[in-house]
Image (spheres, coloured by chain):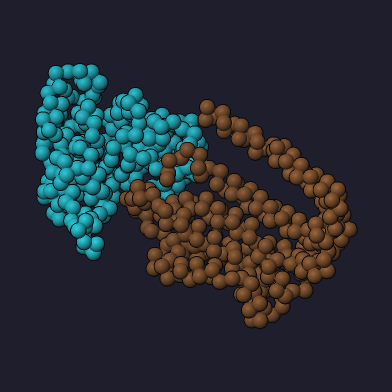
Chain colours: A cyan, B brown
Amino acid sequence: MEQIVADNINKYYGMPSENSRRSYERLQVLAGVSFRVEKNDFVSILGPSGCGKSTLLRLLAGLDRDYEGSIHVDGTDLKEKRVPVCYMLQKDHLMPWRTLMENVLLPAEIEGADLKKEAEIIRPMLKEFGLEEFENYRPHALSGGMRQRAALLRTYRMRGDIMLLDEPFGALDEITRMQMQDWLLDVWGRHRKTVLFVTHNIDEAVLLSDRVLVMSSRPGSIVKDIRIGFPRPRNRDMLLSSQFLSYKGDILASLG
Amino acid sequence: MKRRSENIKKKRKSGIDWLQIGFSLLILVIWQVVVVIRDVPEFILPSPVRVIEELIGSWQILLDHTLVTVTEAFLGLLASIVLGSVIGLAMGYFKTFRRMVYPLFVITQTVPLFVLAPLFILWFGFGILPKIIVVFMVCFFPIAVTFAQGLVRSDSGMDDLLKVMGASRWKIFRISRIPQALPYFFSGLKIAATYGIVGAVLAEWVGAQKGLGVFMTRAMKSFRTGALFADVFIIVLLSLVLYKIVEWVEQMVCKDMSNGGNIV
């Protein structure tokens, strides 16, 4: 079932003009972006920095309605109505004055849900997210990987079946990043949601995804839609296979 | 290395800095020696010992005046904190309001207070109210402005995240922006706290029955420079205590704000 349908999206930003102080020049960031995403698929959006990946995710999150074209999620036009989604950025955005649990409870708190009930749901998940004994710790006492896992758990507890992840592991060191990828695959295998995963790391995209959408540099458009045929569960050995290299070659060629 | 230097800092905070105290004492000793050796008359420069004698000798009168000044400063500061945070919040929340009132606030800070203080007495009488208003005029500005500044300085990523969670603008303020702005609020409050006592004293100069400002003018007019210095000593001490109290409250409230959390 097609859950996300994006049709011919153009997006412009107003830029102060260099020639005249009064006028604005339009800077096109997205040019005719169209794609469809099946429910519970893991789709990566890969492209050079500044190509509009994050902008695209902001549109999908309903944060910006000023674009041409249309986006439908579960049949709802995003210009008309907000659809709840899970959203995560590169920075963990954990509030330093809140404990880990209080941070993860944030989505429920904003919705006005029963926090005691929500905490009972979260507690067993803490173990799965490798945060079991840290419920009452504050973010500054946690490692970078743990913070990112806490942020991801909070993202999981947001309402919505679509996860929009904007370079969630971009700020981590290579080793932590690898651990987080393995762990995300594991968690996602058990709690399926539709994932749109923005990255500029080719290996990461191929390892995690069912599909990789390759974007051109600005104004961004989708230049290649590659289906990754590796079976699930995935493992790191796949990164050494010749098939992986051919995927990588495809992606590099379309980026070039 | 970083951890180690932090430890050292902590130790210094909890203990007493003997270098500071020793140096201050040294200056006092030199002062005393110079006054005694050169035989400087008291009305020109009293020796530290004379000031201490004055403090002990007229402690009852001084205490009487001090209580009045402290009351004025306290009430003025309280009004500044309450109204300053409300108006600071409004300035952070409503851009139009900020643009409207900000220039006016700046102007209130440029009008000389010794012009305003007598006017306030004319308008509000010789009682405590005009003094409170003067303290308020001095202390309100840094609190409101720093708080508003902290509220406006936002993390757009954090705001986006809360918006996607379905938070209204007010909820974003309540959950994220206000706590984030607290360190700013407190830096404004610390400035206000150091001005509070001086503001009250200044208001008393212009016309009052009691207070450290009144005592000060009397001491000056009768060339009792020793009493004047005793008066100043109390003003300095009170301001320091007020500052320390604010600092202590700040540490209580903000202890989890800045330690490596990457919210800003």
Q: Position of B143 compared to B44: left or right?
A: left
Q: Position of residue B115 (x, y in %)?
A: 62, 75
Q: Position of A214 compared to A185: left or right?
A: left
Which image quarter holds the C terminus of chain B? Answer: top left
Res A199 quadrant in image: top left
Res B62 quadrant in image: bottom right
Residue drawn at the location 62% of the way across and 35% of the way down = B10
Q: Position of residue B103 (x, y in %)?
A: 46, 69
**Considering depth in this image, is B136 or B252 the residue closer to the camera?**
B136
Q: How many marks?
A: 0
Res A131 quadrant in image: top left
Q: Position of residue B255 (x, y in %)?
A: 56, 43
Q: Position of A164 compared to B80: left or right?
A: left
**Considering depth in this image, is B264 or A85 the residue closer to the camera?**
B264
Residue drawn at the location 34% of the way across and 53% of the way down = B163
Q: Is residue B106 above or below residue B240?
A: below
Q: Is residue A24 above or below residue A205?
A: below
Q: Is residue B33 above or below residue B100?
A: above
Residue drawn at the location 71% of the way across and 70% of the way down = B204
- Residue A111 in view: no
- Residue extending farthest to the bottom is B122
Q: Position of residue B205 (x, y in %)?
A: 72, 71
Residue drawn at the location 79% of the way across and 62% of the way down = B228
- Residue A242 in view: yes
- Residue extending farthest to the front is B38
